Amino acid sequence: MRTLVRVEEVVRETPSMVTLRFSYPAPALPGQFVMVWVPGDDEVPMSLSYREDGSPKGITVKVMGSTSRHLTELKVGDRIGIRGPYGNHFPLDGNRVLVVGGGSGTAALAPAAEAAHARGARVDVALGAVTAAELLFRDRLRRIAGDLQVSTDDGSEGHHGFVTALVGPMLASARYDAVWTCGPEIMMSKVMAAAKPLSVPVFGSMERIMKCAINLCDACSLGPYHVCADGPVFTHVQLEGLEDFGRYKRSMAGLRIPV
Amino acid sequence: MRTLVRVEEVVRETPSMVTLRFSYPAPALPGQFVMVWVPGDDEVPMSLSYREDGSPKGITVKVMGSTSRHLTELKVGDRIGIRGPYGNHFPLDGNRVLVVGGGSGTAALAPAAEAAHARGARVDVALGAVTAAELLFRDRLRRIAGDLQVSTDDGSEGHHGFVTALVGPMLASARYDAVWTCGPEIMMSKVMAAAKPLSVPVFGSMERIMKCAINLCDACSLGPYHVCADGPVFTHVQLEGLEDFGRYKRSMAGLRIPV
Amino acid sequence: MDRLSTEVAGVRFRNPFLLASGIWGETGAALARAHRDGAGGVVTKSIGSATREGYPNPTVEQLGSWGLLNAMGLPNPGMEHYAAEIALARKEGATVVGSIFGGDAKEFATLARAMEQTGVVALELNLSCPHAKGYGSEIGRDPAIVTEVVRAVKQAVRLPVWAKLTPNTHDIGALAEAAEQAGADAISAINTVRGLAIDPETMRPVLAHGFGGLSGPAIKPIGLACVWQIYDRVKVPIVGIGGISTPEDAFEYLIAGASAVEVGTALSAGGDALFGTLSAGLERLLEHHGFSTLAEAVGASHRVR
Amino acid sequence: MDRLSTEVAGVRFRNPFLLASGIWGETGAALARAHRDGAGGVVTKSIGSATREGYPNPTVEQLGSWGLLNAMGLPNPGMEHYAAEIALARKEGATVVGSIFGGDAKEFATLARAMEQTGVVALELNLSCPHAKGYGSEIGRDPAIVTEVVRAVKQAVRLPVWAKLTPNTHDIGALAEAAEQAGADAISAINTVRGLAIDPETMRPVLAHGFGGLSGPAIKPIGLACVWQIYDRVKVPIVGIGGISTPEDAFEYLIAGASAVEVGTALSAGGDALFGTLSAGLERLLEHHGFSTLAEAVGASHRVR
Ligand SMILES: Cc1cc2nc3c(=O)[nH]c(=O)nc-3n(C[C@H](O)[C@H](O)[C@H](O)COP(=O)(O)OP(=O)(O)OC[C@H]3O[C@@H](n4cnc5c(N)ncnc54)[C@H](O)[C@@H]3O)c2cc1C
Ligand SMILES: Cc1cc2nc3c(=O)[nH]c(=O)nc-3n(C[C@H](O)[C@H](O)[C@H](O)COP(=O)(O)OP(=O)(O)OC[C@H]3O[C@@H](n4cnc5c(N)ncnc54)[C@H](O)[C@@H]3O)c2cc1C
Ligand SMILES: Cc1cc2nc3c(=O)[nH]c(=O)nc-3n(C[C@H](O)[C@H](O)[C@H](O)COP(=O)(O)O)c2cc1C
Ligand SMILES: Cc1cc2nc3c(=O)[nH]c(=O)nc-3n(C[C@H](O)[C@H](O)[C@H](O)COP(=O)(O)O)c2cc1C
Ligand code: FES
Ligand code: FES
């Protein structure tokens, strides 16, 4: 049930991130992820950063450790194994949506933003990164965004500071049906805090260790949830109730460790 | 893959034959057979004597040994296991067909005759049995037959003698597209001999030991054929080429023994 | 729902559907969720002495809808850290069976004592994991070692002890007898069946560990055969495991001789709703067959004439 | 088609797809048909000393499309009568491997001598039928008895001897080693896996014999694991069996270590066309992977780095 695909295109997005495009026929909803096997190496979860039927699907990989590095070094023609897509997805409704992406988190958000735009919703985007060169999908999102604002930790582009600083003013400027976010948990929890007084629902995409990805092994435990099946997208209501959110994750051994 | 069904109706057809009706949804073509399991006893092949969608299917059992006896003693509400239908079927074409049935062989022929009649073909029938009371489906076939002729070995009804004696004159009286037959092999080979000079194709339904019924075990071997998958219906061309036809069959152990 | 309640070696479960070891059981929250979903009891992930990451990914390979191959490699936080997970599950009312694995009788006994402290209702000894080096079926395949391990654990604890056996043997009945004679209070059967998947394109074994354990519908006939054989050989109750995904599957295990069953792989497709569906369906089946208690159904297939 | 030809212990087959024992092989006509259909070779039904009817029906139970349970009970005409069937198959050009089963080493040796007279190219010893009382896995599960049987047969005949092993064991590698040391020229693996099906409505085992042997896709991962293990333990060639229904399945067996494969259950659905499809597909796979001979592919998965 693992499909071996050929890498059809390799795009260096930022100094630390690379997109791999490949044909994989299974339909996918925005926000779903796949398990990516590097033959002879590990298998890791990756959001589909391109998911449209008909065009090659894609993942956008940020170098974290050995497997993600291995992925970013692949060439056109190399083969990877794909299974999935797994998990739930960002909502398919909302007339005006604020998308808040931090770092590689934008990989999961871009297809969701595009899908919303395609069905006529207005999509505003707040995009954050360490530095200007690491801003993922800025041009891709600019094409569809009503308003696109940018922040960098080092001030090399846009607001000097964290992306969360953009969110408050944007939320105040218009009535949003929802906020969709993906990035570091601390960032997502700040986005929720900003949205709370305005009662705008927030949907955040979570990461935990994935092994089976099919709701069996418990590796992806997040409170009572399994991120692979109940997530990766959770509502602020679900997340706020969780002792672990923003604080703890599970190690490969299931040990509870700080995020 | 075995479906347990309730016997819905029991009809005593003749002193030695009983029809059991039951609901079994799988579609079946005329001439196909099912494997009938008597829980706690054996499992035996039986032609579907009723096969229409929507109405209960049926088998018509002649007492041969212990399992067939057991079947004829079942009551409404008793359960039997059914799998199938298996095998090929009588042709679905021909404008004028001669049906030649001997003994319980008529069980396989009746639904084929009805199907031909239903699609507008003219069906003539030659029906033979040991004695009048053992003539299977005489009334059922009379309803659809253009011409129905009967023979009994003891002369208690119709022609006194074998059914094969009816076949020559009937074949001579009109131009048939095909002859369909089921009964003792010696009878079927005589039918073929009668049809040969007129070049009328003959289709005969064969019996051999059935165990798997799914083209694996070789119990139903008939020359290079497996009756469960290549048959039970064979053409005269196939049968005439077989050393075993009318002469040898296989025992439960696969030993070649006289028919 | 009383018709569904069952007893395994003195422990009562509200229904016979237990969460199988290694499924959802690495955390207390997941155990508690299975309890809320309607599991009759929950068996923990197999816990060892030390924190263990397990094998690298790929750890699972799905084979159609009829089978799953896994080589998790017994990841677990280690006994010391896991106690808190059990406490959480117990607080939410779950009936918890503690599964442990070890390299020898002594390690099993030590773990058993620690597990007993957590308040579990019974111990399940994983004598059978087919893909852990030095552990698992290396222990469970030999009646003499089964005897040794079970005896050591029985001496160490007062809790009922379930010996979980491997199907990767020519005579699971002999293993069951060995376990019973050593004092096991129940037999769990079966664990996964040793298997391998190879990717024809890369020509590599798919699972990082190479060999894995087969579970799901494909092993139901194997598990049923094992339970039937064990029922003929021992008097202690049997917990039936392997490929159960429908009420009929469970019923077949019960009439083959099981007093309870564990459900694993089917939870992937079945999710939260499965325990409820299984209980409702089994209740109807028991009624249909005129069994007023589950106990009457246990082994009934052996008595049909 | 030369790329597909393979050698097993000195015997060349035009392609590696052999008809598995017990499938279509009770009669010479069916063996000949498999040859005409494109089988690389045909293995006979397992033949014993006496005429044997086998078990009563039901003898098979289909489990979805992924598995089959059978308990034929080794029906066969007996060696004396079967010789004529082999003669017929040979006359039509089939490369015939004779399968035999017996109750002890002496019976095997006697049968082997008789089988050798028929002109088969090799003998396959069915040491592994899991459902014949006093025969089958009662013999095949014990390395000592495997040694005894293989040695006796080797002393009796000059033909290459293939030992067909049971997966119902904890260590098929040990059985293979025993067979090799006793002189076996090849190892066939696997036979069916012990299983049971119960009808929940009547509460009876479905097969008249009770236990049966599982075959088909469900056992492919089990067979692959066995072949892999055996390849690591012995030098003699391996004939891979179990759940092969596609060219990819066969290719996986080859790269796991098999020099040829046998095809059984898949012929039910695949019929006459299957052998041709398998050969054509495997030819493409070998080419795709750059193997100019089949021999290069054998065990290739062990060598991937
Ligand atoms: C649902 C989901 C979607 C993701 N989408 C993306 C994406 O679109 N782009 C992207 O760059 N990254 C994504 N990730 C994170 C990505 O899986 C990890 O960065 C990657 O696994 C790191 O592997 P490594 O071997 O390079 O790192 P390692 O050196 O092995 O580990 C570094 C860190 O990566 C994480 N990690 C390692 N293995 C796993 C695993 N099996 N499952 C989850 N996390 C793991 C852990 O946090 C670990 O501490 C996603 C994760 C999840 C759970
Ligand atoms: C394709 C096919 C269709 C058939 N259709 C009918 C039908 O519609 N009505 C009917 O009455 N009979 C039919 N038969 C014959 C029927 O299967 C046998 O009469 C029945 O199996 C006898 O079983 P028993 O236990 O009563 O007899 P036994 O005492 O066991 O044996 C008596 C004879 O029945 C035959 N027989 C026994 N077992 C089998 C078996 N497993 N497979 C085939 N033949 C067997 C043998 O010729 C045997 O000598 C059909 C057979 C086949 C092959
Ligand atoms: C992902 C996975 C992990 C497992 N982990 C364990 C384990 O830690 N301990 C154990 O005794 N069995 C473990 N098993 C085996 C199951 O408990 C069960 O015996 C087996 O899967 C058969 O049941 P099933 O077909 O319902 O899944 C695991 C099975 C799976 C699929
Ligand atoms: C109906 C049937 C009959 C069999 N009879 C024999 C036999 O006589 N001798 C033998 O060695 N194996 C016998 N087998 C086992 C097969 O040869 C083969 O080892 C097994 O079925 C696995 O292969 P498969 O999955 O391709 O069917 C039989 C299998 C089936 C399904
Ligand atoms: S990754 Fe295994 S349960 Fe989610
Ligand atoms: S009955 Fe088994 S092959 Fe026909």
Image (cartoon, coloured by chain):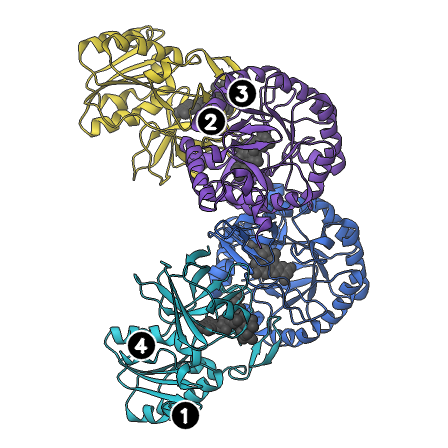
Chain colours: A cyan, B yellow, C blue, D purple
Residue position marked by numbered label 1 in the rendering: A155
Please, what is the three-letter code of the amino acid marked with disc 4?
A: Arg
Please, what is the three-letter code of the amino acid marked with disc 2?
A: Ala
Which disc number belongs to residue D291? none
Give the spatial CA distance, label 4 vs label 1: 21 Å
Residue position marked by numbered label 4 in the rendering: A140
Whether callout 1 and callout 2 share a subunit is answered: no
Which disc number belongs to residue D34? 2
Query: Tag 1's secondary structure?
Result: loop
Please, what is the three-letter code of the amino acid marked with disc 3?
A: Gly
Q: What percent of the width, then of the height, locates residue D116?
A: 64, 19
Residue position marked by numbered label 3 in the rendering: B254
Mark 2 is surrounded, within 10 Å at the Cα level, by few (under 14), some (14 to 19) or many (20 or more) other residues, namely many
Q: What percent of the width, then of the height, locates residue B62?
A: 42, 22
Q: Nearer the viewer, mark 3 or mark 2?
A: 2
Give the spatial CA distance, label 2 vs label 4: 60 Å
Give the spatial CA distance, label 3 vs label 2: 18 Å
